[in-house]
Each structure stands twice: as structure tokens, then as C-alpha cells.
Image (tube, rainbow, N blue to C red):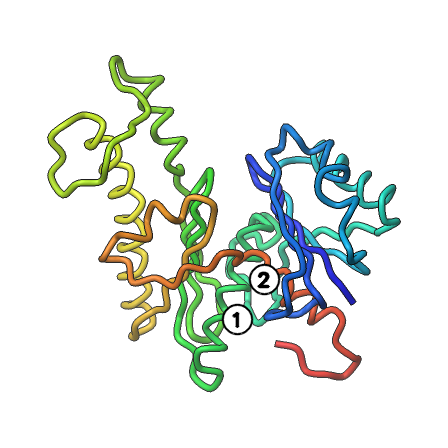
Amino acid sequence: MSFLVIDIGNTRLKWGLYAHPAPGAELLAHGAVVLEDIDYLWELHWKNLMHKPQGMLGCVVAGEAIKKRVEEQLIEGWGLAPHWLSSSARAGGVVNGYEHPQRLGSDRWAAIIGARQRALHQDPADPPPVLAVMVGTAVTVDAVDQGGRFLGGLILPGFGLMYRALESGTAGLKVPTGEVRDFPTNTSDALMSGGTDAIAGAIERSMRRLRVQCGREPLLIMSGGAVIRLSHVEELPASVVENLIFEGLLTLAANASAPPGQPQP
């Protein structure tokens, strides 16, 4: 049965249609729209799909109004009941160590679960700790130990937010178009290099903390719309995953559809 997953972020909605609700399932179709065009999602993307989804699971951080506009198109177009992820104390092989588990963003929770599944796939008997990094409008850096406990994580501004803050709060500085340099010698390169180093530095510090906490080398997984801006950083030996949130959503969907009595991670 084909299955639809949706990630509604701060600036874009991304969706993927999979052959069935499980990690590793064949991707049948996918797309993205900026939130300003959300009302045209059905007409532009979903109306002519060859495969009608039999179920869906999504995560949303953009607010109730955006969510309702998507739900209307799911119901009117396919008669599909919408299901949205809420963070919980335990799911998908992860124990949520957040002080208030329900307050953890659902997109972070899905990415964390997806990253944990990657660690389990690498070594089912002795999975490594894993650091899940999502690089979008904001950047999240979340740590999971080898036992599957989410230890906590960071939230910091993404590239665009940092540059716009500098542009609006500092005379003479504009959004940069330069290059990342070890020792920048012009303002545009200095801004671009500063933003990259700020985010990369936060990731490096979190990797070091997780390494000390767990006593072994963590697996670093990065994803998100702006991850390409970090993929060249030599100090970050990361596995870049295109749709980490989707992998988490598919894991949860597979668990939900497992036969009664079947063990679930």
C-alpha cells in the first residue's frame, strides 16, 4: 500500500510517496512547495499522481493554519484521514530524554528516530551513538547514545537567519555572496565563513561531548535543505541523508502497522 509522508517546516512543505510504510521502501514520487503556495499543493503536485496513498503520516512546525490547509486537500482530494506526529516518551527505538517529551518538536523527533535507525542498521548488535543534525531555517543538533536514549540537543539559527540578523542589525553588512575561506580577506567571505564556522563549531563541540559521554566515536548524520553548505567541511565526517525526517516517519508508520504481538523497536 502506497504511503504519504509530509514534513511541513518553517518555509517549505516537503512530501514523499512511498510504495509501502517502511524504511527503505521505494520512493514513487516526491516534491516540495514553499508555504506561500500551499493552497496549490493538490492541483500542482498531487492531483495527477499515478498511485493514491492509502495512509499518511506527517510532522508540522508551521502552525495550525498551514496544517488545516493541507488537511483540507488530503480529505477533499483523496478522502485521506490526516495523521500528524506528536513527540512521545518512547517511539521508534528511542527513549525521549527531553525534560518535557511532548514539547520536543515533532520534526526533531522524527529526525532523531531516523538517525537511530541508521545507527541500528550500521550495527544491530552494538549500534554507535549518533548525532542527528538538521540544517534548515534553524539548525538542530541532537544526541542519542548507543542504548537509544535521546540525551538532548541544540537549536541555533540557520544560515539565512544569521545573515539577515547581521544585515538588519549592523550598518553596511549585506547578505553574503562570497566563499568559505580559512582566513577571509573581504567582508562577503568573512560573513560566509563566519556563518559556516559557527554552525560547524556547534556540531564539532556536540560530537566531542557525545564521544566523551559514550566513550566511543559517534555516527554523524546530517540532513536538511541547507546541508550542502556544510558538506565540504573536512572536520565533519558526516553521512548526508536526503530525507532523514521521512525515514523517521516511515519507521513509526511501520511500527504502527506491525501485526499484534510482533516486537517493535
Q: Which residue is mark 2?
A: 248
Residue 29 screen position, x and y as percent: 66, 55
Q: Relative to the observer, which residue lies in front, 187 or 155? A: 187
Going by the numbered disc 2, the residue's amino acid type is Gly
Few, some or many residues within 10 Å of mark 2 (<14, 14–19, 20+): many
Residue 58 screen position, x and y as percent: 68, 51
> From what the image shows, is residue 95 above or below residue 53?
below
Q: Which residue is mark 1?
A: 117
Q: CB atoms at circles 2 and 1 under 8 Å apart?
A: yes
**Residue 132, quarter of the rendered image:** bottom left
Q: Residue at x 49, y 56 (%)?
A: 242
Q: Residue at x 25, y 14 (%)?
A: 172
| Number of the label disc, if any, that sits on residue 177 | none
Q: Residue at x 29, y 63 (%)?
A: 237
Q: Residue at x 75, y 56 (%)?
A: 56
Q: Answer with left or right where residue 73 lies relative to residue 96.
A: right
Quarter of the rendering occupied by the N terminus: bottom right
Residue 18 screen position, x and y as percent: 68, 62
Quarter of the rendering occupied by the C terminus: bottom right
Q: Relative to the observer, which residue lies in front, 153 or 235? A: 235
Residue 31 screen position, x and y as percent: 62, 47
Q: Relative to the observer, which residue lies in front, 128 or 5? A: 5
- Which label's residue is closer to the chain start, 2 or 1? 1
> From what the image shows, is residue 84 above or below residue 67?
below
Task: Give the structural element (helix, strand or loop) at label 2.
Answer: helix
